[in-house]
Amino acid sequence: MDIEIREFSKRLKKLRIKRSMTQFDLSVRTGIDCSVISKLENNKTKPSVIHIILICNEFNVKADWLLFGTTDLTDKE
């Protein structure tokens, strides 16, 4: 399964905006550089494993959903 970067970017931006966060806010909360978040949201780069983990932890979403749009959005625990 390959990451559909365009869809990943849309999901990331949608999550961030839904939480009323700026790219800077997300950067501060995750430790991911603001320029990297911008590149991720604008289809300029693929996320690293650590970026995926940090973003999923921040938004409490599953990596499968963030990367591929599959499975439920969040864990049902």
Image (spheres, helix red, strand yellow):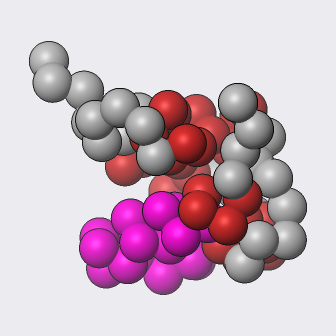
Q: Where's the N terminus, which quadrant?
A: top right
Vertical order, 37 against 71 (above or below)? below
**In the displayed structure image, the side of residue 7 where residue 60 appears, left or right:** left
**In the displayed structure image, the side of residue 51 where residue 67 appears, left or right:** left
Q: Residue furthest right?
A: 45
Residue 68 at x, y percent in the picture? 55, 42
- Residue 2 highlighted magenta (yes or no): no
- Residue 14 highlighted magenta (yes or no): yes
Question: Measuring 14% from the left and 18% from the top, which residue is drawn there?
Answer: 77
Question: Measuring 38% from the left and 78% from the top, which residue is drawn there?
Answer: 17
Front residue of 5 and 50: 5
Question: Measuring 67% from the left and 67% from the top, which residue is drawn there?
Answer: 6
Front residue of 16 and 71: 71
**In the displayed structure image, the side of residue 36 where residue 76 appears, left or right:** left
What secondary structure predominates along the stretch shown in magenta? helix
Front residue of 45 and 36: 45
Question: Measuring 29% from the left and 70% from the top, which residue is drawn there?
Answer: 19
Q: In the rendered picture of this protein, how many numbered marks are placed on residues?
A: 0
Region of the chain picked out in magenta, as a range: 9-24
Q: Is residue 25 visible?
A: no
Residue 49 at x, y percent in the picture? 73, 32
The quarter holding residue 28 reads: bottom right
Vertical order, 19 against 20 (above or below)? above
Q: Is residue 63 visible?
A: yes
Residue 69 at x, y percent in the picture? 46, 46
Q: Residue furthest left?
A: 77
